[in-house]
Image (tube, rainbow, N blue to C red):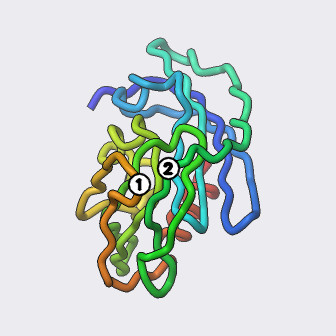
Protein backbone atom coordinates (compact mmCIF):
# COMPACT_ATOMS: atom_id res chain seq x y z
CA UNK A 1 0.00 0.00 0.00
CA UNK A 2 1.52 3.30 -1.10
CA UNK A 3 1.70 5.95 1.61
CA UNK A 4 2.28 9.70 1.36
CA UNK A 5 3.45 12.26 3.90
CA UNK A 6 0.52 14.14 5.38
CA UNK A 7 -0.30 16.96 7.67
CA UNK A 8 -3.77 17.01 9.14
CA UNK A 9 -5.91 19.10 11.45
CA UNK A 10 -8.79 17.38 13.23
CA UNK A 11 -11.58 18.49 15.49
CA UNK A 12 -13.13 15.76 17.64
CA UNK A 13 -16.43 16.51 19.33
CA UNK A 14 -17.65 13.93 21.86
CA UNK A 15 -20.97 14.71 23.55
CA UNK A 16 -20.45 18.46 23.16
CA UNK A 17 -16.78 18.57 24.24
CA UNK A 18 -14.56 19.68 21.36
CA UNK A 19 -10.82 19.07 21.09
CA UNK A 20 -8.48 20.01 18.25
CA UNK A 21 -5.47 18.01 17.05
CA UNK A 22 -2.66 18.49 14.57
CA UNK A 23 -1.14 15.34 13.11
CA UNK A 24 1.87 14.82 10.86
CA UNK A 25 2.28 11.26 9.63
CA UNK A 26 1.93 8.96 6.62
CA UNK A 27 -1.44 7.92 5.22
CA UNK A 28 -2.52 5.59 2.44
CA UNK A 29 -2.55 7.34 -0.93
CA UNK A 30 -6.28 6.62 -1.28
CA UNK A 31 -6.92 9.19 1.46
CA UNK A 32 -4.99 11.81 -0.46
CA UNK A 33 -6.90 11.55 -3.73
CA UNK A 34 -9.67 13.82 -2.44
CA UNK A 35 -7.66 15.61 0.24
CA UNK A 36 -8.78 19.08 -0.84
CA UNK A 37 -12.16 18.36 0.78
CA UNK A 38 -12.49 17.87 4.53
CA UNK A 39 -13.01 14.37 5.91
CA UNK A 40 -15.96 13.97 8.25
CA UNK A 41 -17.54 11.20 10.34
CA UNK A 42 -20.64 11.69 12.51
CA UNK A 43 -21.83 8.95 14.89
CA UNK A 44 -24.52 11.06 16.56
CA UNK A 45 -22.81 11.16 19.98
CA UNK A 46 -19.50 12.16 18.43
CA UNK A 47 -18.11 13.72 15.29
CA UNK A 48 -14.65 13.95 13.74
CA UNK A 49 -13.93 16.49 11.01
CA UNK A 50 -10.51 17.02 9.52
CA UNK A 51 -8.47 18.54 6.74
CA UNK A 52 -5.64 16.57 5.18
CA UNK A 53 -2.86 17.69 2.86
CA UNK A 54 -0.57 15.13 1.27
CA UNK A 55 2.80 15.34 -0.44
CA UNK A 56 5.28 12.83 -1.83
CA UNK A 57 8.74 14.07 -0.85
CA UNK A 58 10.68 13.41 2.35
CA UNK A 59 9.71 15.78 5.18
CA UNK A 60 7.36 17.75 2.92
CA UNK A 61 4.59 17.77 5.55
CA UNK A 62 5.95 20.64 7.66
CA UNK A 63 2.95 22.90 6.99
CA UNK A 64 0.33 23.16 9.75
CA UNK A 65 -3.26 23.26 8.52
CA UNK A 66 -5.97 25.29 10.21
CA UNK A 67 -8.53 23.26 12.19
CA UNK A 68 -11.77 22.93 10.22
CA UNK A 69 -14.62 25.24 11.18
CA UNK A 70 -17.79 23.79 12.69
CA UNK A 71 -19.89 22.68 9.74
CA UNK A 72 -23.54 23.56 9.21
CA UNK A 73 -26.42 21.13 8.71
CA UNK A 74 -26.76 19.96 5.11
CA UNK A 75 -30.24 18.38 5.20
CA UNK A 76 -29.17 14.71 5.01
CA UNK A 77 -30.33 12.51 7.88
CA UNK A 78 -29.03 9.05 8.77
CA UNK A 79 -29.56 6.50 11.50
CA UNK A 80 -27.09 6.34 14.39
CA UNK A 81 -26.79 4.18 17.50
CA UNK A 82 -26.74 4.59 21.24
CA UNK A 83 -26.34 2.07 24.04
CA UNK A 84 -29.78 0.54 23.43
CA UNK A 85 -30.53 0.54 19.70
CA UNK A 86 -29.62 1.83 16.24
CA UNK A 87 -32.79 3.79 15.67
CA UNK A 88 -31.58 7.29 16.49
CA UNK A 89 -31.63 9.94 13.80
CA UNK A 90 -28.60 12.13 13.23
CA UNK A 91 -28.49 15.32 11.18
CA UNK A 92 -25.49 15.26 8.83
CA UNK A 93 -23.36 18.39 8.56
CA UNK A 94 -20.87 19.94 6.17
CA UNK A 95 -19.41 17.46 3.66
CA UNK A 96 -21.16 14.45 5.22
CA UNK A 97 -23.03 13.43 2.08
CA UNK A 98 -23.33 9.68 2.77
CA UNK A 99 -24.92 7.47 5.41
CA UNK A 100 -22.96 4.40 6.51
CA UNK A 101 -23.30 1.25 8.56
CA UNK A 102 -20.88 -1.44 9.54
CA UNK A 103 -19.66 -3.65 12.33
CA UNK A 104 -16.51 -2.79 14.27
CA UNK A 105 -14.36 -4.87 16.52
CA UNK A 106 -12.51 -3.05 19.29
CA UNK A 107 -10.67 -5.60 21.38
CA UNK A 108 -13.15 -8.08 22.82
CA UNK A 109 -16.21 -6.02 21.85
CA UNK A 110 -18.06 -6.11 18.54
CA UNK A 111 -20.63 -3.38 17.81
CA UNK A 112 -22.73 -2.08 14.97
CA UNK A 113 -22.06 1.50 13.86
CA UNK A 114 -24.30 3.86 11.92
CA UNK A 115 -23.97 7.52 11.02
CA UNK A 116 -22.93 10.11 8.45
CA UNK A 117 -19.65 10.29 6.53
CA UNK A 118 -18.07 12.29 3.75
CA UNK A 119 -17.77 10.43 0.44
CA UNK A 120 -13.97 10.69 0.49
CA UNK A 121 -13.90 8.98 3.88
CA UNK A 122 -16.21 6.25 2.59
CA UNK A 123 -13.66 5.50 -0.12
CA UNK A 124 -10.85 5.12 2.42
CA UNK A 125 -12.57 3.44 5.40
CA UNK A 126 -10.96 0.06 4.81
CA UNK A 127 -7.50 1.61 4.63
CA UNK A 128 -7.86 3.76 7.71
CA UNK A 129 -9.73 1.97 10.46
CA UNK A 130 -6.92 0.06 12.21
CA UNK A 131 -4.11 2.32 11.03
CA UNK A 132 -5.37 5.48 12.69
CA UNK A 133 -7.20 3.82 15.57
CA UNK A 134 -5.27 0.70 16.65
CA UNK A 135 -7.53 -2.13 17.74
CA UNK A 136 -10.49 -0.60 15.89
CA UNK A 137 -11.28 -2.76 12.87
CA UNK A 138 -14.32 -2.98 10.64
CA UNK A 139 -15.29 -6.65 10.44
CA UNK A 140 -18.28 -5.96 8.19
CA UNK A 141 -18.42 -2.93 5.89
CA UNK A 142 -18.64 -0.15 6.35
CA UNK A 143 -21.13 0.34 3.58
CA UNK A 144 -21.92 3.87 2.47
CA UNK A 145 -25.10 4.92 0.69
CA UNK A 146 -26.81 8.06 -0.58
CA UNK A 147 -30.15 9.39 0.64
CA UNK A 148 -31.97 10.00 3.89
CA UNK A 149 -31.98 6.99 6.24
CA UNK A 150 -30.52 4.67 3.57
CA UNK A 151 -28.32 3.00 6.23
CA UNK A 152 -30.94 0.45 7.25
CA UNK A 153 -31.48 -0.14 10.92
CA UNK A 154 -31.59 -3.49 12.63
CA UNK A 155 -32.72 -4.25 16.15
CA UNK A 156 -29.19 -5.21 17.17
CA UNK A 157 -28.07 -3.72 20.45
CA UNK A 158 -24.93 -1.62 20.54
CA UNK A 159 -22.38 -0.63 23.08
CA UNK A 160 -20.86 2.76 22.32
CA UNK A 161 -17.81 1.77 24.35
CA UNK A 162 -15.74 0.54 21.38
CA UNK A 163 -16.40 3.72 19.46
CA UNK A 164 -15.45 5.92 22.39
CA UNK A 165 -12.38 3.78 23.02
CA UNK A 166 -11.33 4.16 19.41
CA UNK A 167 -11.79 7.93 19.39
CA UNK A 168 -9.96 8.28 22.72
CA UNK A 169 -7.15 6.09 21.37
CA UNK A 170 -6.86 8.41 18.39
CA UNK A 171 -6.50 11.36 20.75
CA UNK A 172 -3.71 9.84 22.81
CA UNK A 173 -1.77 8.31 19.93
CA UNK A 174 -1.18 11.67 18.29
Q: Which residue is mark 1?
A: 148
| Sequence-first disc among 1 and 2 | 2
Q: Nearer the viewer, residue 171 or 31?
A: 31
Identify which residue is drawn at 46% across, 32% down. 26
Quick check: 7 above or below 171? above
Q: Position of residue 103 (x, y in %)?
A: 31, 67
**x then y, percent, for residue 11:** 68, 47
- What quarter of the picture does the N terminus occupy? top left
Q: Residues within 10 Å of mark 2 (few under 14, many from 20)?
A: some
Residue pictured at 59% horizontal, 28% vertical: 7
What is the distance, in whole Å, between disc 1 and disc 2 at their CAs?
A: 6 Å
Name the residue that disc number 2 marks.
Answer: 76
Q: Residue furthest left?
A: 140
Which x, y percent locates residue 141?
A: 25, 57
Instruction: Tell me the element at label 2.
Output: strand
Q: State the image quarter where residue 101 is shown.
A: bottom left
Left/right placement of residue 115 relative to residue 104 reads right
The image position of residue 99, as x and y in percent, is 40, 53
Image quadrant in which you'd find residue 38: top right
In the drawing, what numbered circle is on residue 169?
Answer: none
Q: Quadrant of residue 156?
A: bottom left
Contact (CB < 8 A) between labels 1 and 2?
Answer: yes
Q: Residue at x 68, y 20 (%)?
A: 63
Q: Nearer the viewer, residue 128 or 76?
A: 76
Residue for point 76% across, 63% down? 17
Amino acid sequence: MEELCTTAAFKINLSGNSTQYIMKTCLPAVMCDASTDPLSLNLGFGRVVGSVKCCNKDLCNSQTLPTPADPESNGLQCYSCDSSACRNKVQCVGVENRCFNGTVNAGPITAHTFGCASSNLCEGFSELDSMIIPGFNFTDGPTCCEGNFCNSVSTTRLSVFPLLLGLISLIFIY
